[in-house]
Image (tube, helix red, strand yellow):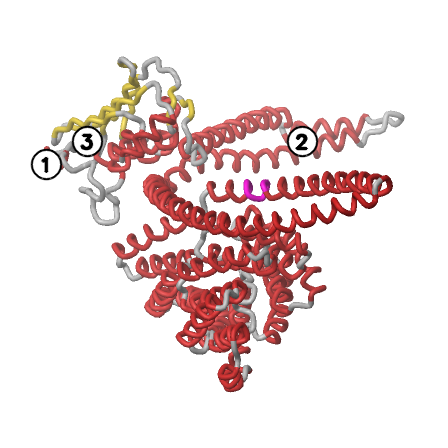
Amino acid sequence: MKKVILLLLSIFLFTTAFAQNSNIDSLQNLLTTAKDTSKVNVLLELSKAYNGVDQAKSIAYAKQAQKLAQTHDFPRGEAYALKSLGMAYVGEGSYPKVLRYWQQSLDIFESIDDKVGASNMLNNIGVVYSIQGWDAKAIEFYLKSLRVAEETGDKLRIATALLNIGAQYYHNPATHDKALDYYLQALPLSKEVGDKTTLGTLTVNIGEIYFEQGDNKKAMSYYQQALDILENSGNENKVAYTLNAIGQIYTARGELAKAMQQHQKAKKVAEAASAKLELAQALNYIGDLQNRMGNTTESLASYERASSIAADLGANYELKDSYEGIAQAYGELADYRKAYEYQNLLLAIKDSLYNTETNKKIENLQANYENEKKQAQIDLLTKDRELQKATLQRQHVLRNALLVGLGLIVLIALILFFNIRNKAKANRMLKNKNAEIHAQKEEIATQRDHLEQTYHNLVSTQEQLIHSEKMASLGQLTAGVAHEINNPINFVSAGIDSLRANFADIMEVLSGYLALKPEEDNKMQLQKLARIKKEMEVEELMEESEQLLVSIKNGATRTKEIVKSLKNFTRLDESSLKKANIHEGIDSTLVILNNQIKGRIKVVKNYGELQEINCYPGQLNQVFMNILNNAAQAIKGEGTIAIKTYKEDDYVVIKIKDTGMGMTEEVKKHIFEPFFTTKDVGEGTGLGLSITYGIIEKHHGKIDVESEPGVGTEFTIRIPLVLSGTSEEKVMAAV
């Protein structure tokens, strides 16, 4: 369960403490006397005071502040009112509303050139996208926030942006080093600013990285420091998160009772603070511990409550953990249909969170940010040189014609004043139009992303089914492969023991010869050594040792061939089109199945001359595995499997024929349907031939079957000699 703590500026900071300590009655009294913009500020304070205590009142006061700010043409007040509305809806988990209000707030801050407010809102929008699993969008807004904060030198917001960028990279184990780099950049800034919330958040996130690296001692040290800092800052949601992190260390140590105690504390704190995200995380951890302790029913209840909260929040990381736990619980309760449904939901969530498209977008966004930063520095130097040149020219003009110059300056100043005022007005209108266009573009992009996501989910589900069936087949065949490897390994083991004994006898004789001294009379020693040599039969030992070395080499060579065949069969890393030899794939599959075949089934190969073809080798190996395994199982005693390959027109043809039980016409009609099987319960999933059919279609090929009860079955597979990536994509789109 991998989580990371994010930082929202002015959202989750001191909200609960402020509501408890603020004098709401004083604010109510002040509201009766305040006027104009002052009244807007009082309404905003009331909205903050009620946030986390009474969301309805918090929203009502924020809306009054917005309306009053519009009446008095007070854009900054309107921006903060929209921001307060977003605050209130964060507590309810209504993220679409949050994003809408905060985008409006951001537009106003940018229109009045309030860079602090703009940086704040850019960061907070990024956090909401991150919670929903939109990593690329989150990074985009964090980088924008960082860029604006660097322009103003705002160290608090620079530290916050660096922290959240690091947290985003933490999601991917391959980029933990980048995450730690961003955290270490933010740490001295947060200490300098003295903000406890930022410092506590950084400390717990650094602890997370050490935990992932397996250094539980360092991780616990950082978590305890973070807990002390955050408890003093009044951030109950982050306290709950840190308690969950400490619980994870106890779980890793196997101290489940202590772990449960920490997660129950986190649950209690999160419920009291209405911190729904942290509550969902605590429930997921509690469900995991209950499952480990054998309380499957209680575990299921915890996971289902967590999934309900996470779904309402749109928190995909928490939803992923909940679905995984629910699927496991139903599996242990033997409700396999429910387990399968939640496994499919889990696959869809994983696909949306961990796709290479997101990683590429993140890298491109960061590269664009660095390029823009360098360009800004170049522009600044260029403007500085132009300014120096203009200054020298002005001095020259003033020196030669002071009176004329003064007159021109006054005239130019007046012209610039009116131009600037007109341009400012035009810029405001242009920004408003741009905001409308931007909103429309965002809506179109969201719809496009949704369609792309749906397509990728379908592709991922198909690939996962193929992979799962392949792993299931390999699991059933593990014992056979182990037996095949065991024989040559026994040769090696026995040979080494004998060789060690022979070597000891030979070394005894050799040591005697090495002890002889040339300057002395060694006749007696030589006679003694000759007697020992004869008694030990050294020449025979040397010949036997040479034979043992040959036996060891043969055993190692056989083991190498079996492992090579197993690796060639799986080819899990080959998910793209590659040139492959069909015969190698069939032979590798036969090696894997050798334990089922040898001694009772004769394999007859009639291979034609075939060129390498463009295909998905791993998936074709799965096809051969499914058909050959079925053929072996269909032959109850002794029998024959005949394999024939040849080229016909633009196709490679593979025929696999067995002398097994055969099938009726009624069974033949259903063999390619998912979950259809004639095997006993527990012996087959009914997915093998369904997946086989899908793989052949993906290759633009054909598969036919002929069978007669009591005679046997013959499968005929046709694969095109030429298959391009583009044509394959078109087929998938059509499906």
Look at the image and give the residue range highlighted in magenta.
Answer: 363-368
The residue that label 2 is drawn on is 506
Residue nearest the viewer, comparing 154 with 286: 154
- Name the residue type under label 2: Ile
Q: Earlier in the sequence, mark 1 or mark 2?
A: 2
Question: Can you see residue 681?
Answer: yes
Quadrant of the drawing holding the C terminus: top left
Marks 1 and 3 sit apart, C-alpha to C-alpha, by 17 Å
Is residue 241 rendered to the left or right of residue 572?
A: right
Q: Secondary structure at mark 2?
A: helix
Local crowd size for mark 2, using a 10 Å CA cut-off: few (<14), some (14–19), many (≥20): some
Q: Position of residue 134 (x, y in %)?
A: 45, 51
The residue that label 3 is drawn on is 660
The residue that label 1 is drawn on is 666
- Rendering quarter of residue 93: bottom left
- In the rendered image of this protein, does residue 651 appear above or below residue 70? above
